[in-house]
Image (tube, grey):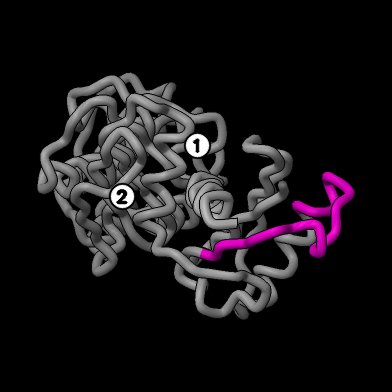
């Protein structure tokens, strides 16, 4: 049996196709202005890599901000439920899931089956999200994917006093003008985002094991900073960016 999950987020679109209980294919693209276009393109990409067609899919579940605008899904589910399910499938011992996405951050406490026990999320402020990292990387003319490597070269710990993105950007420019080293600034940026996410997670009482999901988890500097902010050793997954789509595919398999 072939099932699929399609996760249309604010910055990226993800698709996962599962066959007989295993991931057969996945794809990630930059989100387009229209969620429908993002969904079609990312699913076509995932299907083409396994030489399958839309008719081969028994059931597809949609999730993410654009889930109500995916034309080909059979059902939709919240990203909270999908991230919980996907994380526990990948790390069965997971009991807390922290997802830092492009426009929001979520902390989810889960049970052994991947069910949601408690959750909290922040979508009102960019300071604890991937958007914060993107804004600052643009301001410093650094590629987003290079932030982790750059932060690893930091030799001096500095802190950012401003949580607001606008003021933090101004503070970082001032630090550059004062001669602060870029690796130290990037490390401070990671810590600022991680501290905000950790504060959010403590609202639901963090329980081990803790898994970080979402595209930001691919940033090694952010992964280390969040673990330090929480005081735990985070568990990693192979591809954290597709976790929501994976959870959607697993839910599709349950009901196909």
Q: Secondary structure at mark 2?
A: helix
Q: Is residue 76 above or below residue 20?
A: below
Q: How many marks?
A: 2
Q: Which residue is mark 2?
A: 172
From the viewer's perspective, is 34 left or right of 45?
Answer: left
Cα–Cα gap, marks 1 and 2: 23 Å
From the viewer's perspective, is 145 left or right of 173?
Answer: right
Residue 9 is one of the magenta-drawn residues: no
The residue shown at (31%, 42%) is: 98
Q: Earlier in the sequence, mark 1 or mark 2?
A: 2
Q: Which mark is residue 218?
A: 1
Residue 53 is one of the magenta-drawn residues: yes
Image quarter (top left, top right, bottom left or bottom right) of the C terminus: bottom right
**Residue 190, position as x, y percentages in the image:** 32, 39
**Residue 47, position as x, y percentages in the image:** 80, 54
Q: Quadrant of residue 236?
A: top left
**Residue 78, position as x, y percentages in the image:** 39, 63
Mark 1 is surrounded, within 10 Å at the Cα level, by few (under 14), some (14 to 19) or many (20 or more) other residues, namely: some
* Residue 250 showing in the rendered view: yes
Q: Is residue 219 above or below residue 251?
A: above
Q: Secondary structure at mark 1?
A: helix
From the viewer's perspective, is 64 left or right of 212?
Answer: right
Q: Is residue 57 above or below residue 182?
A: below
* Residue 182 showing in the rendered view: no
The residue shown at (62%, 70%) is: 73
**Residue 157, position as x, y percentages in the image:** 23, 26
Q: Is residue 177 above or below residue 102?
A: above
The residue shown at (29%, 20%) is: 233
Mark 2 is surrounded, within 10 Å at the Cα level, by few (under 14), some (14 to 19) or many (20 or more) other residues, namely: many
Q: Find the magenta span and give its range.
A: 46-62
Q: Nearer the viewer, residue 170 or 236?
A: 236
């Amino acid at each position: 049996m072939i099932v699929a999950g399609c996760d249309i987020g604010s910055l990226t679109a993800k698709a996962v196709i599962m066959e007989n209980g295993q991931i057969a294919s996945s794809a990630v693209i930059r989100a387009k202005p229209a969620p429908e276009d993002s969904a079609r393109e990312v699913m076509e990409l995932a299907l083409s890599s396994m030489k399958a067609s839309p008719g081969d899919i028994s059931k597809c579940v949609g999730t993410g901000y654009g889930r109500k605008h995916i034309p080909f899904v059979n059902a939709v589910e919240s990203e909270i439920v999908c991230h919980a399910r996907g994380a526990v499938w990948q790390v069965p011992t997971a009991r807390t899931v922290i997802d830092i996405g492009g426009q929001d951050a979520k902390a989810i406490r889960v049970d052994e089956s991947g069910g949601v026990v408690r959750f909290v999320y922040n979508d009102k402020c960019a300071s604890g999200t991937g958007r914060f990292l993107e804004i600052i990387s643009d301001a410093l003319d650094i590629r987003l994917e290079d932030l982790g490597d750059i932060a690893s070269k930091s030799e001096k710990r500095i802190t950012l006093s401003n949580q607001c993105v606008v003021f933090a950007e101004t503070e970082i420019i001032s630090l550059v003008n004062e001669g602060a080293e870029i690796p130290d600034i990037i490390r401070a940026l990671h810590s600022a985002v991680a501290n905000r996410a950790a504060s959010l997670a403590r609202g639901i009482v963090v329980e081990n094991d803790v898994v970080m999901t979402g595209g930001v988890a691919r940033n090694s500097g952010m992964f280390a900073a969040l673990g330090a902010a929480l005081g735990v050793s985070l568990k990693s997954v192979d591809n954290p960016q597709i976790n929501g789509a994976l959870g959607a595919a697993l839910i599709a398999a349950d009901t196909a």
